[in-house]
Image (tube, rainbow, N blue to C red):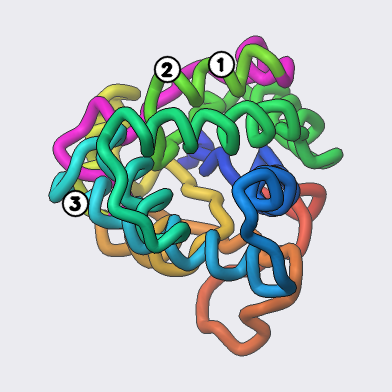
């Protein structure tokens, strides 16, 4: 019997890709970096170094610095990298928005008598600010951020920590997220049922449960 639904945060409830893309385009122009590939390069650099943070190879602050150093191809001190990243971060946080289907989905979960939880690969302080600013804090029961865990998704320990915190068996908690590897396959490996939120239709043939909108979510 299903007892909880666990949502990913970025690009599941919150439109992180749009916020990040707009922020890096505006910020990069201030440091003399332009061109059609700016957003794609930043996304690739970010993914690479954020994965290093999730495996605890580097710190949260360290992955920010490495993103700036690689993106700008510059040998920067920590203080210089921090100052440059702050310009991006200010624009990124100003661009946070939620998807229209996020709050209705969370409310349907709770109306069904289920726990609404969030498991995010992020820094807890930043993710709590995001929830507060966007009016999501009152719509969920539990937030678990990977910064408080030994490793982030798709490590099975991340999923098991949440279900243990909720006092549930893995089979009683449904994971919903936009990442096939981190959210869905990671959850399945930990024994949780999972749903892939594929808003762009990027995974038409994948052999997992898939929805195009949170409005299609059933539990």
Q: Residue tagged by mark 1? A: 129
Q: Does the magenta portion include 152?
A: yes
- Taking the view exactly as shown, the residue that stands out farthest to the bottom is 205
Secondary element type, mark 2: helix
Mark 1 crowdedness (10 Å alpha carbons): few <14, some 14-19, many ≥20: some
Q: Residue at x 58, y 32 (%)?
A: 87
Q: Is residue 107 above or below residue 141?
A: below
The reply to whether the magenta stretch includes residue 69 is no
137 sits to left or right of 79: right
Find the distance from the CA under tag 3 to the CA under tag 2.
Answer: 19 Å
Q: Are marks 1 and 3 in contact (CB under 8 Å)?
A: no
- The reply to whether discs 3 and 2 touch (Cβ–Cβ < 8 Å) is no
Residue 46 in picture, x, y percent from top left: 44, 56
3 or 2: tag closer to the N-terminus:
3
Q: Is 219 situated above or below 106?
A: below
Residue 125 is tagged as 2
Q: Are marks 1 and 2 in contact (CB under 8 Å)?
A: yes
Q: In this rendering, would 28 be left or right of 120?
A: right
How many numbered marks does the figure carry?
3
CA gap, disc 1 to disc 2?
A: 6 Å
Highlighted magenta segment, given as a residue range: 134-154
**Local crowd size for mark 3, using a 10 Å CA cut-off: few (<14), some (14–19), many (≥20):** some
The answer for how far apart the CA atoms under marks 1 and 3 are is 24 Å
The residue that disc 3 covers is 55
- Image position, residue 211 (x, y; %): 70, 64
Q: 168 or 107: nearer the eye?
A: 107
Could you tell which of marks 1 and 3 lies nearer the N-terminus? 3
């Amino acid at each position: 019997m299903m007892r909880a639904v666990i949502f990913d945060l970025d690009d599941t409830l919150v439109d992180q890709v749009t916020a990040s893309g707009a922020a890096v385009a505006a910020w990069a122009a201030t440091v003399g970096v332009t061109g059609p590939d700016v957003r794609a390069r930043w996304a690739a650099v970010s993914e690479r170094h954020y994965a290093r943070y999730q495996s605890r190879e580097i710190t949260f602050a360290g992955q920010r610095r490495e993103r700036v150093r690689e993106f700008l191809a510059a040998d920067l001190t920590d203080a210089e990298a921090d100052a440059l990243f702050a310009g991006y971060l200010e624009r990124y946080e100003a661009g946070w928005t939620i998807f229209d289907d996020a709050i209705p989905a969370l409310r349907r979960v709770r109306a069904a008598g289920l726990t609404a939880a969030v498991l995010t690969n992020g820094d807890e302080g930043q993710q709590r600010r995001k929830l507060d600013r966007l009016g999501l804090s009152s719509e969920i029961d539990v937030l678990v951020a990977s910064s408080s865990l030994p490793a982030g998704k798709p490590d099975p320990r991340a999923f098991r920590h949440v279900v243990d915190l909720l006092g549930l068996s893995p089979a009683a908690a449904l994971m919903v997220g936009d990442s096939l590897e981190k959210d869905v396959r990671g959850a399945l490996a930990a024994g949780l049922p999972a749903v892939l939120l594929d808003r762009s239709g990027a995974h038409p043939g994948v052999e997992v449960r898939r929805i195009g909108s949170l409005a299609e979510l059933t539990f």
